[in-house]
Image (cartoon, grey):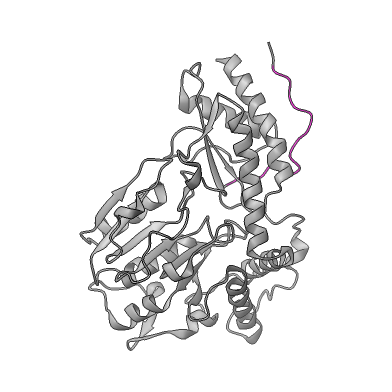
Amino acid sequence: MAFEAPAARPANPRFSSGPCAKIPGFTLDMLSDAPLGRSHRAAVGKNKLAEAIDLTREILGVPDDYRIGIVPASDTGAVEMALWSLLGDRPVEMLAWESFGEGWVTDVVKQLKIHAEVKKAPYGEIVDLETVDFDKDVVFTWNGTTSGVRVPNGDAIPANRQGLTICDATSAAFAMELPWDKLDVVTFSWQKVLGGEGGHGVLILGPRAVERLEHYTPAWPLPKIFRMTKGGKLIEGIFKGETINTPSMLCVEDYLVSLKWAKSLGGLPALIARSEANAKAVADFAATRDWIANLAVDPATASCTSVCLKFTDARIKDDAGFAKAVAKRLEKEGVALDVGAYRDAPAGLRIWCGATVETSDVAALMPWIEYAFETEIEAQ
Protein backbone atom coordinates (compact mmCIF):
# COMPACT_ATOMS: atom_id res chain seq x y z
CA MET A 1 0.00 0.00 0.00
CA ALA A 2 1.44 3.37 -1.05
CA PHE A 3 2.23 5.83 1.72
CA GLU A 4 0.66 9.24 1.08
CA ALA A 5 3.01 12.17 0.54
CA PRO A 6 2.71 14.99 3.10
CA ALA A 7 0.91 18.15 2.06
CA ALA A 8 3.30 20.64 3.72
CA ARG A 9 6.82 21.18 2.40
CA PRO A 10 9.88 22.97 3.80
CA ALA A 11 10.07 26.50 2.41
CA ASN A 12 13.84 26.03 2.13
CA PRO A 13 15.02 22.46 1.38
CA ARG A 14 18.70 23.24 2.03
CA PHE A 15 19.90 21.07 4.93
CA SER A 16 23.51 20.61 3.80
CA SER A 17 26.15 20.37 6.53
CA GLY A 18 28.49 22.61 4.60
CA PRO A 19 28.30 24.93 2.91
CA CYS A 20 25.16 25.46 4.96
CA ALA A 21 21.92 27.34 4.34
CA LYS A 22 22.19 31.09 3.86
CA ILE A 23 20.56 33.36 6.43
CA PRO A 24 16.77 33.61 6.11
CA GLY A 25 15.72 36.07 3.41
CA PHE A 26 19.17 36.21 1.83
CA THR A 27 19.50 37.89 -1.55
CA LEU A 28 22.58 38.84 -3.56
CA ASP A 29 21.55 42.49 -3.19
CA MET A 30 22.72 42.25 0.43
CA LEU A 31 26.31 42.11 -0.85
CA SER A 32 26.12 45.38 -2.78
CA ASP A 33 28.47 47.16 -0.36
CA ALA A 34 31.35 44.76 -1.09
CA PRO A 35 34.42 46.72 -2.27
CA LEU A 36 34.86 44.70 -5.46
CA GLY A 37 37.84 45.52 -7.63
CA ARG A 38 39.57 47.20 -4.67
CA SER A 39 42.66 46.06 -2.84
CA HIS A 40 42.08 44.35 0.48
CA ARG A 41 45.02 46.46 1.65
CA ALA A 42 43.22 49.70 0.84
CA ALA A 43 41.52 51.44 3.75
CA VAL A 44 38.08 50.18 2.70
CA GLY A 45 39.33 46.59 2.58
CA LYS A 46 41.15 46.78 5.91
CA ASN A 47 38.11 48.34 7.54
CA LYS A 48 35.84 45.54 6.31
CA LEU A 49 38.23 42.86 7.58
CA ALA A 50 38.65 44.62 10.92
CA GLU A 51 34.87 44.93 11.26
CA ALA A 52 34.49 41.19 10.62
CA ILE A 53 37.03 40.45 13.36
CA ASP A 54 35.38 42.86 15.80
CA LEU A 55 31.89 41.44 15.23
CA THR A 56 33.22 37.90 15.56
CA ARG A 57 34.69 38.83 18.93
CA GLU A 58 31.48 40.53 20.06
CA ILE A 59 29.07 37.77 19.09
CA LEU A 60 31.20 34.83 20.23
CA GLY A 61 32.30 36.58 23.42
CA VAL A 62 35.99 36.08 22.64
CA PRO A 63 38.17 37.58 25.42
CA ASP A 64 40.04 40.78 24.63
CA ASP A 65 43.45 39.11 24.98
CA TYR A 66 42.66 36.46 22.37
CA ARG A 67 43.72 37.19 18.78
CA ILE A 68 41.32 36.56 15.88
CA GLY A 69 42.69 36.11 12.37
CA ILE A 70 41.07 35.51 8.99
CA VAL A 71 43.18 32.89 7.22
CA PRO A 72 43.18 30.97 3.91
CA ALA A 73 41.78 27.54 3.08
CA SER A 74 38.71 27.39 5.29
CA ASP A 75 38.75 25.61 8.66
CA THR A 76 41.26 23.13 7.26
CA GLY A 77 43.76 25.91 6.68
CA ALA A 78 43.21 27.30 10.17
CA VAL A 79 43.72 23.90 11.81
CA GLU A 80 46.81 23.13 9.76
CA MET A 81 48.34 26.51 10.66
CA ALA A 82 47.90 25.65 14.33
CA LEU A 83 49.20 22.07 14.05
CA TRP A 84 52.29 22.94 12.01
CA SER A 85 53.17 26.04 14.01
CA LEU A 86 52.49 24.93 17.59
CA LEU A 87 53.02 21.18 17.93
CA GLY A 88 56.33 19.47 18.70
CA ASP A 89 57.28 21.40 21.82
CA ARG A 90 55.76 18.86 24.24
CA PRO A 91 53.96 15.47 24.08
CA VAL A 92 50.74 15.36 22.09
CA GLU A 93 47.42 13.60 22.59
CA MET A 94 45.04 13.35 19.63
CA LEU A 95 41.31 12.78 20.16
CA ALA A 96 39.09 11.57 17.32
CA TRP A 97 35.42 10.62 17.09
CA GLU A 98 34.71 11.25 13.42
CA SER A 99 36.36 11.64 10.04
CA PHE A 100 37.75 15.16 10.40
CA GLY A 101 39.31 14.34 13.77
CA GLU A 102 40.79 11.25 12.11
CA GLY A 103 42.23 13.54 9.46
CA TRP A 104 44.06 15.62 12.05
CA VAL A 105 45.48 12.41 13.52
CA THR A 106 46.84 11.47 10.10
CA ASP A 107 48.41 14.89 9.61
CA VAL A 108 50.11 14.91 13.01
CA VAL A 109 51.28 11.30 13.05
CA LYS A 110 52.08 10.69 9.37
CA GLN A 111 52.89 14.15 8.01
CA LEU A 112 54.53 15.87 10.98
CA LYS A 113 55.70 12.46 12.24
CA ILE A 114 54.99 13.31 15.87
CA HIS A 115 54.75 10.31 18.17
CA ALA A 116 51.33 11.19 19.60
CA GLU A 117 49.01 9.21 21.82
CA VAL A 118 45.80 8.67 19.87
CA LYS A 119 42.43 8.11 21.54
CA LYS A 120 39.46 7.27 19.36
CA ALA A 121 35.75 6.70 19.87
CA PRO A 122 33.34 5.10 17.40
CA TYR A 123 30.81 7.18 15.48
CA GLY A 124 28.07 8.32 17.84
CA GLU A 125 30.34 8.51 20.89
CA ILE A 126 33.17 10.72 22.15
CA VAL A 127 36.36 9.92 24.02
CA ASP A 128 36.14 9.83 27.81
CA LEU A 129 37.63 13.26 28.51
CA GLU A 130 38.44 12.30 32.11
CA THR A 131 41.19 10.02 30.73
CA VAL A 132 42.89 12.77 28.74
CA ASP A 133 46.20 14.19 29.96
CA PHE A 134 45.89 17.94 29.44
CA ASP A 135 49.51 18.48 30.45
CA LYS A 136 50.11 17.34 26.88
CA ASP A 137 49.03 19.35 23.86
CA VAL A 138 45.54 18.04 23.04
CA VAL A 139 43.93 18.29 19.58
CA PHE A 140 40.20 17.60 19.16
CA THR A 141 37.01 18.62 17.41
CA TRP A 142 34.34 20.24 19.57
CA ASN A 143 31.52 18.98 17.38
CA GLY A 144 31.82 15.94 15.15
CA THR A 145 30.31 17.26 11.93
CA THR A 146 30.16 13.78 10.41
CA SER A 147 29.16 11.87 13.56
CA GLY A 148 26.63 14.17 15.23
CA VAL A 149 28.28 14.26 18.65
CA ARG A 150 29.79 17.13 20.61
CA VAL A 151 31.76 17.89 23.73
CA PRO A 152 29.07 18.73 26.32
CA ASN A 153 31.20 21.32 28.18
CA GLY A 154 34.75 22.16 29.15
CA ASP A 155 34.59 20.81 32.70
CA ALA A 156 37.17 18.08 32.06
CA ILE A 157 39.80 20.60 30.92
CA PRO A 158 41.80 21.88 33.92
CA ALA A 159 42.49 25.56 34.27
CA ASN A 160 46.09 24.82 35.32
CA ARG A 161 46.90 22.59 32.34
CA GLN A 162 50.46 22.62 31.03
CA GLY A 163 49.63 21.75 27.43
CA LEU A 164 47.69 23.64 24.79
CA THR A 165 44.13 22.75 23.82
CA ILE A 166 43.72 23.01 20.05
CA CYS A 167 40.04 22.85 19.15
CA ASP A 168 38.49 22.49 15.71
CA ALA A 169 35.12 24.14 16.35
CA THR A 170 33.92 24.63 12.81
CA SER A 171 30.40 23.22 13.25
CA ALA A 172 30.14 24.47 16.84
CA ALA A 173 31.07 28.16 16.71
CA PHE A 174 27.92 30.34 16.66
CA ALA A 175 25.72 27.42 17.78
CA MET A 176 27.27 26.22 21.04
CA GLU A 177 28.89 27.70 24.12
CA LEU A 178 32.68 27.54 23.88
CA PRO A 179 34.56 27.89 27.21
CA TRP A 180 37.27 30.28 26.10
CA ASP A 181 39.31 29.94 29.29
CA LYS A 182 39.68 26.21 28.53
CA LEU A 183 40.61 26.64 24.86
CA ASP A 184 43.96 27.94 23.66
CA VAL A 185 43.32 27.64 19.93
CA VAL A 186 39.91 27.63 18.23
CA THR A 187 39.27 27.33 14.50
CA PHE A 188 36.18 27.49 12.33
CA SER A 189 34.96 28.42 8.88
CA TRP A 190 32.08 30.78 8.33
CA GLN A 191 30.37 28.58 5.71
CA LYS A 192 29.08 26.42 8.57
CA VAL A 193 26.76 27.87 11.22
CA LEU A 194 26.43 31.30 9.60
CA GLY A 195 26.06 29.95 6.07
CA GLY A 196 28.82 32.14 4.65
CA GLU A 197 30.59 31.50 1.36
CA GLY A 198 33.52 29.07 1.50
CA GLY A 199 37.27 29.43 1.25
CA HIS A 200 38.16 31.34 4.41
CA GLY A 201 39.00 30.17 7.91
CA VAL A 202 39.10 31.86 11.28
CA LEU A 203 41.96 31.19 13.69
CA ILE A 204 41.62 32.32 17.31
CA LEU A 205 44.69 32.25 19.56
CA GLY A 206 44.71 32.58 23.33
CA PRO A 207 47.66 34.09 25.25
CA ARG A 208 49.21 30.67 25.95
CA ALA A 209 49.23 29.85 22.24
CA VAL A 210 50.83 33.20 21.42
CA GLU A 211 53.50 32.57 24.04
CA ARG A 212 54.24 29.20 22.45
CA LEU A 213 54.53 30.77 18.99
CA GLU A 214 56.99 33.39 20.24
CA HIS A 215 59.20 30.98 22.18
CA TYR A 216 59.16 27.82 20.08
CA THR A 217 60.39 27.14 16.56
CA PRO A 218 59.23 23.87 14.94
CA ALA A 219 61.85 21.48 13.57
CA TRP A 220 60.17 21.43 10.16
CA PRO A 221 59.96 24.21 7.55
CA LEU A 222 56.73 26.22 7.52
CA PRO A 223 54.98 27.18 4.27
CA LYS A 224 54.49 30.92 3.88
CA ILE A 225 50.73 30.77 4.54
CA PHE A 226 51.39 29.08 7.92
CA ARG A 227 53.89 31.63 9.24
CA MET A 228 52.54 33.73 12.10
CA THR A 229 55.78 35.07 13.59
CA LYS A 230 58.71 37.14 12.41
CA GLY A 231 61.87 37.59 14.42
CA GLY A 232 60.37 35.65 17.31
CA LYS A 233 57.33 37.92 17.58
CA LEU A 234 53.73 37.40 16.54
CA ILE A 235 52.81 39.17 13.31
CA GLU A 236 50.03 41.21 14.88
CA GLY A 237 48.78 42.49 11.55
CA ILE A 238 47.32 39.07 10.72
CA PHE A 239 44.95 39.54 13.63
CA LYS A 240 43.94 43.04 12.62
CA GLY A 241 42.78 42.21 9.12
CA GLU A 242 46.12 42.20 7.29
CA THR A 243 45.57 38.75 5.84
CA ILE A 244 48.38 36.39 4.79
CA ASN A 245 46.99 36.06 1.29
CA THR A 246 44.29 37.80 -0.72
CA PRO A 247 40.79 37.27 0.68
CA SER A 248 37.58 37.50 -1.32
CA MET A 249 35.97 40.78 -0.31
CA LEU A 250 32.69 39.39 -1.63
CA CYS A 251 32.93 36.52 0.87
CA VAL A 252 33.94 38.94 3.62
CA GLU A 253 30.88 41.05 2.87
CA ASP A 254 28.73 37.93 3.02
CA TYR A 255 30.21 37.09 6.44
CA LEU A 256 29.52 40.64 7.63
CA VAL A 257 25.89 40.36 6.50
CA SER A 258 25.57 37.10 8.45
CA LEU A 259 27.24 38.55 11.55
CA LYS A 260 24.93 41.57 11.52
CA TRP A 261 21.94 39.26 11.12
CA ALA A 262 23.14 37.26 14.13
CA LYS A 263 23.56 40.44 16.16
CA SER A 264 20.07 41.63 15.21
CA LEU A 265 18.60 38.40 16.62
CA GLY A 266 20.27 38.85 19.98
CA GLY A 267 23.72 37.39 19.37
CA LEU A 268 25.00 34.02 20.49
CA PRO A 269 22.14 33.12 22.87
CA ALA A 270 19.64 33.55 20.04
CA LEU A 271 21.75 31.51 17.63
CA ILE A 272 22.10 28.70 20.15
CA ALA A 273 18.36 28.74 20.82
CA ARG A 274 17.59 28.43 17.11
CA SER A 275 19.98 25.49 16.69
CA GLU A 276 18.69 23.73 19.78
CA ALA A 277 15.08 24.15 18.63
CA ASN A 278 15.94 22.69 15.24
CA ALA A 279 17.72 19.70 16.78
CA LYS A 280 14.81 19.14 19.18
CA ALA A 281 12.39 18.93 16.26
CA VAL A 282 14.45 16.06 14.85
CA ALA A 283 14.93 14.39 18.24
CA ASP A 284 11.21 14.54 19.06
CA PHE A 285 10.39 12.94 15.72
CA ALA A 286 12.95 10.15 16.12
CA ALA A 287 11.81 9.46 19.68
CA THR A 288 8.32 8.55 18.45
CA ARG A 289 9.46 6.24 15.64
CA ASP A 290 10.94 2.78 16.13
CA TRP A 291 12.67 2.66 12.72
CA ILE A 292 15.02 5.63 13.11
CA ALA A 293 17.33 6.87 15.86
CA ASN A 294 19.94 9.50 16.58
CA LEU A 295 23.45 8.20 15.88
CA ALA A 296 24.57 9.88 19.11
CA VAL A 297 24.48 7.25 21.86
CA ASP A 298 24.26 9.73 24.76
CA PRO A 299 21.75 12.60 24.44
CA ALA A 300 24.14 14.76 26.50
CA THR A 301 26.65 14.65 23.64
CA ALA A 302 24.17 14.86 20.75
CA SER A 303 24.97 17.70 18.35
CA CYS A 304 22.54 20.55 17.80
CA THR A 305 23.96 21.36 14.36
CA SER A 306 24.91 18.23 12.39
CA VAL A 307 22.20 15.83 13.53
CA CYS A 308 23.00 12.32 12.30
CA LEU A 309 20.31 9.65 12.05
CA LYS A 310 20.47 5.90 11.47
CA PHE A 311 17.75 3.55 10.26
CA THR A 312 17.06 0.70 12.67
CA ASP A 313 14.29 -1.28 10.96
CA ALA A 314 15.04 -5.01 10.67
CA ARG A 315 13.36 -5.12 7.26
CA ILE A 316 16.16 -3.10 5.66
CA LYS A 317 18.26 -5.43 3.51
CA ASP A 318 21.11 -3.07 2.56
CA ASP A 319 21.81 -0.26 5.04
CA ALA A 320 23.95 1.87 2.71
CA GLY A 321 21.75 1.37 -0.34
CA PHE A 322 18.57 2.04 1.59
CA ALA A 323 19.88 5.26 3.17
CA LYS A 324 21.07 6.54 -0.21
CA ALA A 325 17.68 5.75 -1.74
CA VAL A 326 15.87 7.69 1.00
CA ALA A 327 18.19 10.70 0.57
CA LYS A 328 17.77 10.55 -3.21
CA ARG A 329 13.98 10.42 -2.90
CA LEU A 330 13.96 13.43 -0.57
CA GLU A 331 16.05 15.36 -3.08
CA LYS A 332 13.87 14.28 -5.99
CA GLU A 333 10.81 15.52 -4.11
CA GLY A 334 12.59 18.84 -3.58
CA VAL A 335 12.17 18.75 0.21
CA ALA A 336 15.74 18.05 1.38
CA LEU A 337 19.03 18.58 -0.43
CA ASP A 338 22.37 17.04 0.56
CA VAL A 339 21.14 15.06 3.59
CA GLY A 340 22.95 11.78 3.01
CA ALA A 341 25.41 10.69 5.71
CA TYR A 342 29.05 11.61 5.19
CA ARG A 343 30.88 9.07 3.03
CA ASP A 344 33.02 7.72 5.92
CA ALA A 345 30.18 7.68 8.45
CA PRO A 346 27.63 4.92 9.15
CA ALA A 347 24.78 4.79 6.64
CA GLY A 348 21.92 7.16 7.39
CA LEU A 349 20.89 10.79 7.11
CA ARG A 350 22.52 14.01 8.30
CA ILE A 351 20.24 16.99 8.86
CA TRP A 352 21.89 20.36 9.36
CA CYS A 353 20.14 22.18 12.19
CA GLY A 354 22.33 25.27 12.51
CA ALA A 355 21.01 28.73 13.24
CA THR A 356 20.31 29.75 9.63
CA VAL A 357 17.75 26.94 9.29
CA GLU A 358 14.15 27.67 10.26
CA THR A 359 12.56 25.29 12.78
CA SER A 360 9.37 25.30 10.71
CA ASP A 361 11.35 23.83 7.80
CA VAL A 362 12.85 21.10 10.00
CA ALA A 363 9.38 20.24 11.31
CA ALA A 364 7.98 20.12 7.77
CA LEU A 365 10.80 17.80 6.67
CA MET A 366 10.15 15.12 9.29
CA PRO A 367 6.93 13.68 7.71
CA TRP A 368 8.73 13.57 4.39
CA ILE A 369 11.47 11.41 5.92
CA GLU A 370 8.75 9.04 7.08
CA TYR A 371 7.18 9.11 3.61
CA ALA A 372 10.52 8.33 1.96
CA PHE A 373 11.24 5.58 4.48
CA GLU A 374 7.89 3.83 3.99
CA THR A 375 8.10 4.19 0.21
CA GLU A 376 11.58 2.68 0.05
CA ILE A 377 10.62 -0.15 2.44
CA GLU A 378 7.77 -1.02 0.08
CA ALA A 379 10.07 -0.78 -2.95
CA GLN A 380 12.65 -3.27 -1.60
Residue 84 lies in quadrant: bottom left
Q: Which secondary structure dominates the residues rendered in magenta?
A: loop
Image: magenta residue range = 3-16
Picture quarter with the N terminus: top right
Quick check: is 299 in the magenta stretch?
no
Give residue 214's quadrant in the image: bottom left
Q: Residue at coordinates 53% horizontally, 57% vertically from top-left? A: 172
Residue 8 magenta = yes
Q: Is residue 42 above or below residue 162?
A: below
Residue 9 visible here: yes
Q: Nearer the viewer, residue 153 or 136?
A: 153
Residue at the extreme top: 1
Residue 21 seen in this snapshot: no
Vertically, is 172 above or below 40? above
Compared to residue 10, the image places residue 315 above or below, namely above
Q: Tell me what residue is drawn at x 43 percent, y 84 percent.
A: 235
Q: Position of residue 153 (x, y in %)?
A: 47, 57
Q: Residue 239: image x %, image y %?
A: 50, 80
Q: Position of residue 73 (x, y in %)?
A: 47, 64
Considering depth in this image, is 301 or 92 the residue closer to the camera? 301
**Residue 228 appears left or right of 55:** left
Q: Residue furthest bottom?
A: 231
The quarter of the rendered structure image containing the C terminus is top right
- In this figure, what is the number of numbered marks? 0
In the displayed structure, does residue 222 sit left or right of residue 343? left
Question: Which one is in front, 177 or 9?
Answer: 177
Residue 367: horizontal and vertical position, in percent?
69, 30
Q: What residue appears at the point 52 percent right and 47 percent down from the top-left corner? A: 303
